[in-house]
Image (cartoon, helix red, strand yellow):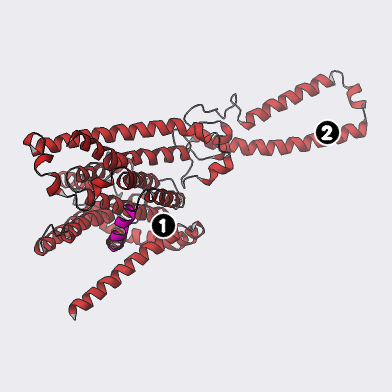
Amino acid sequence: MLLTLAAACTAAFSALCAATVAAFLVLVMIPRLHSPVRAWLRPRAVERVESGLVLVAAAQRLQRPWLTWLFQHSSHTVSVTFYASFLPVLFWLGFPELGRDLVLLMTLALYVGNAIKDLVCSPRPLGVPYGKQRLRLLGAQGEEAELNAKEYGLPSSHTLNSLCLNYFVVWYLYDRQLIAAGTTLALYCVVALWVVWIAASRLYLGLHTPVDILAGAVAGLAVLVCFIAIEGLLVRWLFSGPQAVLHAALVALLLLRLHPRPLEHTPSFQFSTSFMGAMFGTVVGVAWVSPHAHQPGVQLAQLWAGDKVLYGSRLLWAARRLALGFAIVGVLKEGSRAAFKAALPLLYRFFPLPIRRLWQPPVHNLYRPAQEAAAAAAASQAGKVTQRRANAQQDKIKHANGSAVEEQQPGGTQATGSGQAARRRRGAALDGSPNSRGHSLGSHGRLGADVLAALPHNEAGLPWDVDVTSRFFAYAGIGLAVTGVSPRVFEVLGW
């Protein structure tokens, strides 16, 4: 009876989490709801952030160099660099099924977390005044200061992602009967302590308040339980054939295009793009290129057995796999990104601006000349209207006075001609021609002032649609290299 009740409660909780995640994704796909939802949620989130600053200040009063070092480096376990190093190792050294599931799970977790950030736009503690005391970003260097601190605060992505990744690994090992129930319970306790440690590090470093951490924990739990509930469906979908590649491409395109646009530019959308690209490349590798290398039966024991070991040395076999695998990843990532950055601007020339506007990422224009060109285009339009009115008024005067005006004004034709030339020069300057201040941008998508005025660009002057698309396929190259190309090469080499 108790077991039946527990199973029913578990099923109900799983259904609730899956419905919550699905409802949020539906909300994301209805852009007209973003503004009213933000208008309702943001003031309440800001109020909770302000009330939580006292805890951040209290945590920072405990500042010690060794503690800052520990918190800072433990936070690196929830970073793009860590994922790019850890997940390929799982694929190449005996757990391709676990690696595949983690890519799908972390893609969902990152997207949900980043979408909530850009939907709510709740500030981090550093962006909120706290009396006379100034809250600081401790240990500010590298990815933490350059990227993470520039995102909005709610929810805490580190809490969300740490909870999802670590709890899923333990669940997977137990579900596949690789560890006993007692070991599973002990590992769950260790993971809970680790998640609390990560959450405390975010308070101490000045990056989050308690409401951010609570939101991250709730969102992480919902995503984790939802993913576990649908994991079997995802496996069947992945091995359904090459059509899974088309499905993954459509899902990625839809979710990225409808990602909430934040009030100010943040790197959250770029993080989502990166992992969505890695997910797409993983699906291509698993479902199309090397499906035989990712069957559920491929596990650690089979890969490390007998003839799979090079020269009788397991460590040498693993080292050769890792060295060659990461080399393939580096070549495919950098090569695909460079190729797409070079090819996309040329390809996009064939698309009219109205078509390109249909695929514009939800980001802000960061290129100052582009902003100037947009202002110049507006001024040009206003100038043209004013000039047409002046010309019409002048035509009326000439029509009323006949040719008397030109007879009384020697050299009138030349003056009029010079005036028209001056007007043409002014118009050219306002239109942003190559000789004007609105610089004509040559290569890499810099297509002239008309595009500058019509499309958002990044800091380097590259249109965001080019930047985002090349980023997507660069990380798709990583996923394909890890799950498709590397297993094929290992198979050919007999590794």
Look at the image and say whether residue 236 sits in the magenta stretch: yes
Judged by its main secondary structure, the magenta piece is helix
Left or right of residue 105: residue 2: left
Residue 476: mark in rendering: none
Q: Amino acid at mark 1?
A: Val
Q: Residue at x 41, y 59 (%)?
A: 25
Front position in the image: 104 or 140: 104
Q: Residue at x 74, y 35 (%)?
A: 387
Magenta-tinted stretch: 225-238
Q: Which residue is mark 1?
A: 120
Tell me the quadrant of the picture where the N terminus can be found.
Answer: bottom left
**187 w.r.t. 447: above or below:** below
Residue 129 visible? The answer is no
Q: Which residue is mark 2?
A: 394
Q: Position of residue 143 (x, y in %)?
A: 29, 41
Left or right of residue 268: residue 205: left
Left or right of residue 337: residue 412: right
Front position in the image: 193 or 203: 193
Q: Position of residue 77 (x, y in %)?
A: 22, 47
Q: Quadrant of residue 48?
A: bottom left
Earlier sequence position, callout 1 versus callout 2? 1
Tell me the quadrant of the picture where the C terminus can be found.
Answer: top left
Question: Marks 1 and 2: which is nearer the front?
Answer: 1
Q: Quadrant of residue 309?
A: top left
Q: Quadrant of residue 226?
A: bottom left
Mark 2 lies on a secondary structure that is: helix
- Disc 2 packing (10 Å; few <14; some 14–19; many ≥20): few
Residue 361 visible? The answer is yes
Front position in the image: 274 or 57: 274
